[in-house]
Image (tube, rainbow, N blue to C red):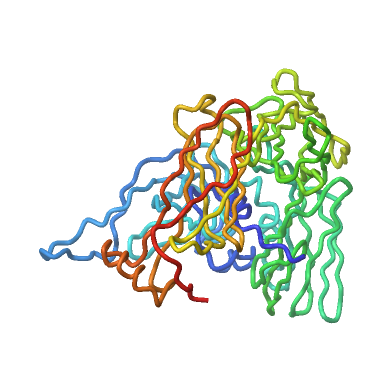
Amino acid sequence: MKKIFPVLIVTTLLTAVQTARAACDCANRLSPGEAYSHATAVFTGVVKRVETDTLKDQAGQKDQAGQIADNSIAGQLAYVQVEKSYKGVKEGEIVLHQPDDGCTPQFRAGQRWLFYANYQQGSETWVVSGCSRSRAIDFAADDLLYLGRLPQSASQTRISGVVSQYEQNPQQGFSLVKNVAGTKVRIAGQDKTYEATTDKNGVYEVYGPVPGRYTIQVDPPSGFRIRFPIPFGPAILPEGETARVDLMPNSSTGADFVVSSDSTITGRVLDPAGAPIPNICVDLVPSIVTPGHPFRIDDCTKPDGRYELKQVPPGDYIIVVNRSKKPSASEPYPHSFYPGVQARNKATVVTISQGAKLEGYDIRIPRKLPTIVLQGVLSYSDGKPVAQEQVSFKADPDNPNPGWDRDAITLTDDQGRFSLPIIQGSTGTLAGATYLSESKFPDCPEIKKLLDAKHQASVEAQTERVRIDQSTAGLDIRNIKLVFGFAACEKKQ
């Protein structure tokens, strides 16, 4: 099955790398060689201090009164002490004017970065773009290797990248664990295949490949799996676990690879009688929760009740059923924990190590909320059935246990029949509903009259609401009739 490129996770990763506060809409990621060529200055340095800055729009646009408009943009001045210069500046201090536009990096005192900076002739200021390869030193191993071999590295073709372990860390969110050394990388071209091994900083590189298209594939270490590649330079969106790149003459290209723990927890969710429960969701929760750090590894059960929690970082966890959902008629099960308890302090803590495959973690839900079924027929005023339309139950607000989701909804079958489970003891109203429009019912004067009366192109029509008041006997309610106040018309096919 073709995998969808994980844009959301890549955006999260790039944001972490660049510390930009919103995703940048960059056409493509630059290679180290491209970034070096495009930048006015390239250097490593330490941010000594930052100040608030107001940048004037250099276009100098006039407003309607003919005055120069104040198109100022709030931002910051970042004073950077240059440590090592690779291009364009000397050692000393450089001041960066960084607009607060949601893409351009905003710095903090004490940060140590590799900077690809550009000089703005109009404003006579320096700026670091959010779409450059500027990044914290911890993320710059590939770039520093290329820069350290100048000028030779700029005179040869080069394919490179970094293999990094990222995990959905319970304390820090999706974050870097380490760059992975000793990983085998295969770079296959039309006429020749190159092999490389990542160094102590997780970097692989090959110098001198002939220009052309290459496929890059990583053999992850034991206990890891490829999460996704991130190609850069002239590249094509990756398919699955490989990256394809185009190498031009006297240029560089490549792909970074993110790997994660190939650890899983599998089991089944069973009802109190031991029967499998389909379509109920299971979450993995850290045994010690850190507020403010999102963590989500989950799965919903298949028809046989099975679930699989994937890419689990090493650690201690609790398995939760129905974590985020209220008990409802479709999932009439309370919040429960492995192996089958309702109190969190009685849940069994599950410990998993790197690459472990934990099986048989079955959860037997301790109890099921009793339900009844509302059955009947939805019809038009002339008695013809209404097929494939909505029937819904709306619970009264004063029902007991306000944390439960007592509302329910279903569709009628081709004969207008419906069968709708609700939690036993619920009181409320039942109604059918449909949307009316001339495009849906093109030859129906009665419906056109209804629309003209509302002065709308489409309206929602409902039947009269039927009151549902239950006794505690818990009996199904049958032969309910829901009727629209207009006759049937032929729908547009």
Task: Give the answer, above or below, for where 281 lies relative to 378.
Answer: above
Q: Would you say residue 97 is visible in this rendering?
A: no
Q: Which residue is found at the position 29% from the left and 60% from the top?
A: 57
Q: Which residue is found at the position 84% from the left and 53% from the top?
A: 220
The quadrant where residue 10 appears: bottom right
Q: Nearer the viewer, residue 459 or 316?
A: 459
Looking at the picture, how far across and down is residue 46, in whole percent? 54, 42
Q: Nearer the viewer, residue 23 or 136?
A: 23
Looking at the picture, how far across and down is residue 39, in whole percent? 52, 64
Task: Give the answer, above or below, for where 18 lies relative to 168.
Answer: below
The quadrant where residue 231 appears: bottom right
Q: Which residue is found at the position 77% from the left and 34% from the top?
A: 271
Which residue of the protein is positioned furthest toward the left in this rendering? 65
Looking at the picture, how far across and down is residue 430, in whole percent? 49, 44
Q: How many numbered markers are drawn?
A: 0
Task: Give the answer, above or below, for where 172 lies relative to 488.
Answer: above
Q: Would you say residue 157 is visible in this rendering?
A: yes
Looking at the picture, how far across and down is residue 170, in whole percent? 67, 34
